[in-house]
């Protein structure tokens, strides 16, 4: 059986809510509920601007420690 490894960044903006940014199970990465939170984990980026929010969200996904070689 393969263990699920929690994916998180430092600082982890979701720690207080006990929400994981994702899980790695073997070679599979499962991510859910990503948002356009800035790298400090404090503010939403691009409020009212879909393109800016999407760009920040994908940057956040790419910054997760378990995804450096992953393809999006």
Image: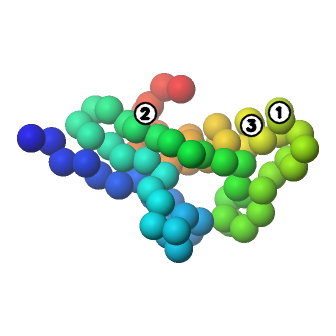
Q: Position of residue 25 (x, y in %)?
A: 27, 40
SS label for mark 3: helix
* Residue found at the very far bottom of the displayed protein: 16
Is residue 39 at least partly visible in the picture? Answer: yes
Q: Which residue is mark 3?
A: 55
Quadrant of the snapshot with the N terminus: top left
Query: Closest to the observer: 9 or 50?
Result: 50
Who's the residue at 28% across and 32% down the image?
27
SS label for mark 1: helix
* Residue found at the very far right of the displayed protein: 48
Who's the residue at 48% across and 26% down the image?
71
Q: Quadrant of residue 20?
A: bottom left
SS label for mark 2: loop
C-alpha separation, residue under disc 2 versus residue under disc 3: 19 Å
Q: Which residue is mark 2?
A: 69
Q: Earlier in the sequence, mark 2 or mark 1?
A: 1
Image position of 58 with respect to 8: above or below: above
Left or right, 51 with respect to 38, comes to: right
Q: Are marks 2 and 3 in contact (CB under 8 Å)?
A: no
Who's the residue at 59% across and 65% down the image?
13
C-alpha separation, residue under disc 2 versus residue under disc 1: 24 Å
Left or right, 38 with respect to 60, comes to: right
Q: Which residue is mark 1?
A: 51
C-alpha separation, residue under disc 3 versus residue under disc 1: 6 Å
Q: Are marks 2 and 1 in contact (CB under 8 Å)?
A: no
Classify 10 Å Cα crowding around label 3: few (below 14), some (14-19), many (20 and above).
few
Image position of 18 with respect to 34: above or below: below
Q: Nearer the viewer, mark 2 or mark 3?
A: 3
Q: Which mark is residue 31?
A: none
Classify 10 Å Cα crowding around label 2: few (below 14), some (14-19), many (20 and above).
few
């Amino acid at each position: 059986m393969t263990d699920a490894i929690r994916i998180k960044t430092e600082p982890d903006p979701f720690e207080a809510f006990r929400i994981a940014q994702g899980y790695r199970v073997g070679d599979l990465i499962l991510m859910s509920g990503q948002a356009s939170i800035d790298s400090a984990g404090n503010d939403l980026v691009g409020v009212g601007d879909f393109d800016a929010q999407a760009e920040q969200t994908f940057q956040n996904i790419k910054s997760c420690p378990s995804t450096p070689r992953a393809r999006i």
